[in-house]
Image: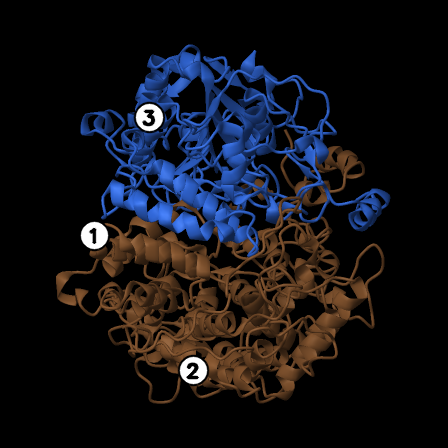
Chain colours: A blue, B brown
Amino acid sequence: MDQQKWEKILTDETTRRRPAFFGRPHWTRRNFFQVMGAGIAGSFLAQEAKAEVCSAQSVTTVNKAENVIFILLSGAPSHVDTFDFKMTNGVTPATAAPATINGVLWPTGILPKLGNMTSDFAVLRSVRSHALVHSLAQTWAQIGRNPAGALGNIAPNIGSIVALEKASQRRPSDILPTFLALNSGGALGPGYLDSQYAPFKVNAGAALPNTANGFGQARWQEALTQMHAVDDVLRIDSPLGKAAEDMDGFYESAKSLMYNPAVNQVFTVVAADSQRYGNNAFGNACLVAKQALTANAGARFVQITLGGWDMHTNIYTGAQNIFTNGKILDDGLSALLSDLKGAGLLDKTLVVAVGEFGRTPQITAAAGRDHYANQFAFMAGGGVKGGRVIGQTNATGASITDFGWSRNREINVEDIEASIYSALGINWTNVCYNDPFKRGFEYVPNSPQDYWGPIDEVFK
Amino acid sequence: MGNLVHNETTGNRMTKYLVSTVCLAAVFSPIYAQDVPVSSASPDELAVSHAECSFFGPQRERFLPNANRRTRLGDTTIKVMAMMAAPAASTGDSGNAASGSIPSLPGGSRSYGRPTPNTSDNLIDKEIFRVLQQKGVVPAEKTNDYEFIRRVTLDLTGRIPTVERLQSFVADTDPNKRANLVDELLGKSEWVDKWTMFYGDMYKSAANQPSAGLNRFPQGRDAFNAWIRNSLSSGKGYDQMARELIASKVTPGNTTFNFSQGELNWIFNGRVTNVRLVQDDYDQMAANTAETFLGLAHANCLLCHNGRGHLDTLSFWGANTSRSTLWGLSAFYARTALQSPSAGTNLNYWYPVDNPAGNYLLNTTTGNRPTRAPLPSGNTVTPSYPFSGKGPQSGETYREALAREVTSDFQFARASVNYLWAEFFGRGIVDPPNQFDPDRLDPANPPPAPWTLQPSHPELLNALAKSFIDSGYDIKALMRLITTSDTYQLSSRYDPAKWNPDWEPLFARKLVRRLWGEEVTDALALSSNIPTTFNQRDSAGGAPTWAMQTAEPQQEAAFQQAFLIGNRDDQPRSDTGNIQQALAMMNDATVMGKVNPAAAVAAQGIVAKSLALSNDDAVTNLYLNILSRYPTDTEKKSAVAFLSTGNRNQKGQELAWSLYNQVDFIFNY
């Protein structure tokens, strides 16, 4: 480590003037009314005085995506059985049914539907994970940096950064939180950012609970009006502090979710649709993600988690194996891409699917695969050129033979993070000095030095 | 293509970046770097399974709210609270849900002024107000009686006060009434309920921990809870609690093991997976010991790799500590075997056994943690407590030796005190409280620049730890010291235009705390006089009356889940807010059932009882029961007008609902 630089930062920490605002922008109901006129609910309208605390390099963003669907394949899927398929005689079952599609060896027995739409997505094969511990690497993938690094403990989920960046674009009709987390109870939160940028966690498949009141709508509104009449002195510019103001913000958001047919339409799944998406929890999450985006109601970043990939034993024959989980992914993801395309949204929606790492090319004594740094990433829509494979691995999938992109090194989750920001038109080199330690929070770590950055090749 | 780790080419390339940027070391360094000798096995061949480093994942956010509960710099209109204006004169024989009358209040008992270093003999106040004065920061005023009794009753017992106690407390003219109240609360069974839940969270007393593949069964959990309850209610010293958790043996004649001897259950948090290496268990037990009893979450990192390149910006101690040092800690568990006499059946007893021989061996290439290769000194690690260098003495088991070393370490007292301090104040003196840096604690021996001392109040932390030790590690004595301090009794109210978030670590005001899910549930039941029914057993094995008595956070209760009660496995309890909490408070049956109860219990409910009174008294009664205070003049006028038009019964329900949805119901302020 560069001791001089390190000392300078530590010294600056104590001498740097604190920024003109901290965390919470002025998004109280009062400000909202001033901006928008009274009577409209919508607590996600916020303006960050970013210029005061952030600096960035001059970059050109891809800026073609308006939305992102980020699918975390938790447990770490085997790359050599899916998107970097390798046929190993005596190991890979014939039922994997490899076939060459557009010059790419594809496991049509595992991912049949996606095999029919390879022109719609890109596969990245020169990706490597930093860590082989599930929780560490999953956290790494969601915050795009080392969780044990200096700001790892306060780093926001990528979706929270997107929510912050897109806050100024919210309209009064935007009733959904910008950041939805479906089937993602363990999704990382907003870190040091304001709680309004937190993921809204919902288990897909059932209507959103508690969106109607037992009094009926008219009496509920009457009671609510009474509450605000006396309680706003504690809720707005609260003498009790930020936590009380935040709670008021959550009430504002909650209200906009109640008695709203559009909300029910987003979160309720119709049986026939659910069937098309595979009739399971992941499929329902993909369906709800699509419904949330077609509703055009404020949701811009949707995180979905599909677990069950940690196949240490009997990867081809276990109760939950590469075929069963592959089918869940194939059904849900293919239906999602088709529907987004049909709705004219795929061009505006970046879909990313990535595990926290890959699995050993060698089959183990337990007929499974253990943890391995080489992995794949899947990207579609939002400006991504489909029908592409970026990077190549050797015959076994054990090592990278061609990085396949201009930086000529392995792709890390930080590069994927930068690509997400670039696709959305967000300057990924932003450094904001409003973090609690005043060290300077880099959207993508070390991007100001141009180490990690967008994988431009997937967009060209 | 190079490997991620142990690859010369990759390493050199990355080194270029290391010199140009600050945070890269932590990012780029080998994840699996071992101590001195580098493994001959390629790390890519390393089979790593099910490693669950509790420092990451949702656990990472366990203490995040503390760092995140920041207020903006205010530049807005000053809001002066009119709350707690003197109530109207006595309303005579009006009633409340429980007792039947609302007496008048004595005047002049509500303003306590602004404390200074000289107004208190409490060691906490001496230091807190000295620093505030030195920095020229004006603290909040001391809180009034209504706020104090609600605050301290919630903090110590998890309940809101009853209206009778609220009124008798305010009317009490004894100058020691706050200290007397604290003593009263510390003696209540509710105190045991709440802190059994707290320590149950800390020790992970769960029937089942799916992420760790660990099943204690309800019997094991109940025994664990019973041990916590008994320890708390008998006033057992915290050092003794730690010794029992770390070193207890099966009592001769006990044939149901951890199902009847609760303290045996803690050690199983270190049993990480089914297919495993014993060294992984030893390491996890050591990591749990370090985090739980020493506040050293970073020990877990160091049990995989040296600190340099990983903890450089986080911990001066960690950055200079090697993996082998922590192996010395793990080696204390090297003779601990976790045994089950009924393995393979559905019902497992578990118990730890102390083998007479056995060592921590450096001979692994698989498992949860990186390769353990022999050191120059050999392939056997000798137990050595990292902070004293001492090992087992003759006549004691390895675990007994560790328990002795841990509980005689000053850091044990410091960490234990700080965990409790953080619970009462919303942030630790070292914060987050599980990330102590042992080499940045001593004000007489500060770390070299650019490092600074880690605690916000180093002398106070040491004084508190010393006081804790001198009291015989008495938890109640520590809580008494805290809750009777002026610092704890500062108001949470502060002019938002004048508050500077940098004053938060100075404890210049009391930070508000969103109630636990159990506290919200119980406050609803207590204030409405409509009990809640629970599916779970309580922590003593019976049927719970209160949510705080349930054996573990209720996973099936959606209402409580909205309040992020955690699962004692991979989801920690959290006090952050979210949209679901607002939806739940407005609409969930748990709330609606209190304001519009089932016919069978409607008559006993707060709404029916209040509506039996005049509108004036009905409003006062609702405020006293639900918010533990009188309405302000403005509130009263507004509420009485609300109640005076339309269907009175419906308006009564709506008024009660509106009070449950005020922010001063959901927060301890």
- Disc 1, SS: loop
Mark seen at residue B647? 1
At x 43%, y 29%, the residue is A299
- Report the front residue among B484 and A426: B484
**Quarter of the view holding residue B593:** bottom left
Q: Nearer the viewer, mark 2 or mark 1?
A: 1
**Quarter of the view holding residue B507:** bottom right
Q: Position of residue A126 (x, y in %)?
A: 56, 26
Could you give the CA–CA distance between mark 3 and mark 2, rounded to whole angstroms?
A: 57 Å
Is residue B429 shown left or right of residue B443? left
Mark seen at residue B168? 2
Mark seen at residue A291? 3
Q: Position of residue B104 (x, y in %)?
A: 42, 78
Q: Position of residue B607 (x, y in %)?
A: 25, 63
The answer, for residue B57, to whether it is visible in the render is no
Q: Which of the chains bears the disc numbered 1?
A: B
Could you give the CA–CA distance between mark 2 and mark 1, rounded to whole angstroms?
A: 34 Å
Asked if labels 3 and 2 share a chain, the reply is no
- Report the front residue among A176 and A273: A176
Residue sticking out furthest to the left: B600
Q: Which of the chains bears the disc numbered 2?
A: B
Asked if labels 3 and 1 share a chain, the reply is no
Q: Position of residue A57 (x, y in %)?
A: 73, 25
- Report the front residue among B126 and B59: B126
User: Going from the N terminus, do you reach mark 2 or mark 1 first?
Assistant: 2
- Report the front residue among B635 and B431: B635
